[in-house]
Amino acid sequence: MKKYISCVLLTAMLTIASACGSTKSTNEPESNISIASLQEAMLSADTTLPEMTKISSEDDQAELNFTFLSDLSYDLVDSYFYAYASEGTAEEIAVIKLKDKGDASAMMQSMHDHVKSRQGTFQEYDPKQVSMTEKAVITREDRYVALIISSKNGLVQKAFESSFE
């Protein structure tokens, strides 16, 4: 009889313990936000942006164009958009949707390297633009990494974050 009661109690404890072990990765679906929607929301958040040249993973030379933004392997990328000031000023907004969110740290480091490179370029030919690059925002949500260089970084970042709510 003691063995029977012990088995029932053990089974009950294991059932309760397994119910407490839920995690986001198994119970909540991954974000699947459209890159085009993010581009529209983020670019419209800052009405002071100059004319922007837009490239994306939908373009014919998407992989080659991606190298202007990052040196990370394009094989890790699901999709992306990249908008930069057509006149050569510092404004840039980009979102990279990765195939695996485990690669987000590497992508964020690549974005930091990109910003440092841009700062060096601006030091040479337009030092007034350096201060904007120094305020660059690099952030992530799930497997999406965003780069924001704009005079209204906060508004653009809010538009990015709001897309995931």
Image: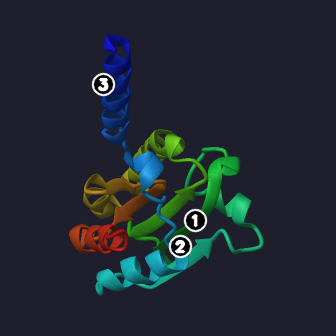
Reply above or below: 19 against 79.
above
**Cα distance, mark 1 to mark 3?**
53 Å
Amino acid found under the numbered disc labelled 1: Tyr
Q: Which residue position holds label 3?
A: 9
Contact (CB < 8 A) between labels 1 and 2? yes
What colour scheme does the image use?
rainbow
* Chain-order first, disc 1 or disc 2: 2
Which residue corresponds to the image point at 53% horizontal and 42% vertical from the top-left? Answer: 103
Q: Which residue is mark 2?
A: 35
- Label 1, on which residue? 80
Q: Secondary structure at mark 1?
A: strand
Residue 164 horizontal side relative to residue 29, left or right: left
User: Where does the image place residue 76, in percent across and percent down from the top left?
Assistant: 64, 48
Rendered location of residue 84, percent (x, y): 48, 71
**Residue found farthest to the right:** 60
Task: Identify the mark nearer the N-term, 3 or 2.
Answer: 3
Whether residue 144 is visible: yes
| Residue 33: image location, x then y, percent | 49, 71
Q: Amino acid at mark 2?
A: Ile
Residue 45 in the image: state x and y as whole percent: 31, 82
Residue drawn at x 60%, y 73% as measured from the top left: 55
Q: Spatial distance from mark 1 to mark 2, Cα to Cα?
A: 6 Å
Amino acid type assigned to the residue bearing label 3 in the image: Leu
The answer to which image quadrant residue 47 occupies is bottom left
- The residue located at (29%, 84%) in the rendering is 48
**What residue is rendered at 53% in x and 75% in y?**
34
- SS type, badge 2: helix
- Determine whether label 1 and label 3 are within 8 Å by CB: no
Please, what secondary structure does the residue beneath circle 3 have?
Answer: helix
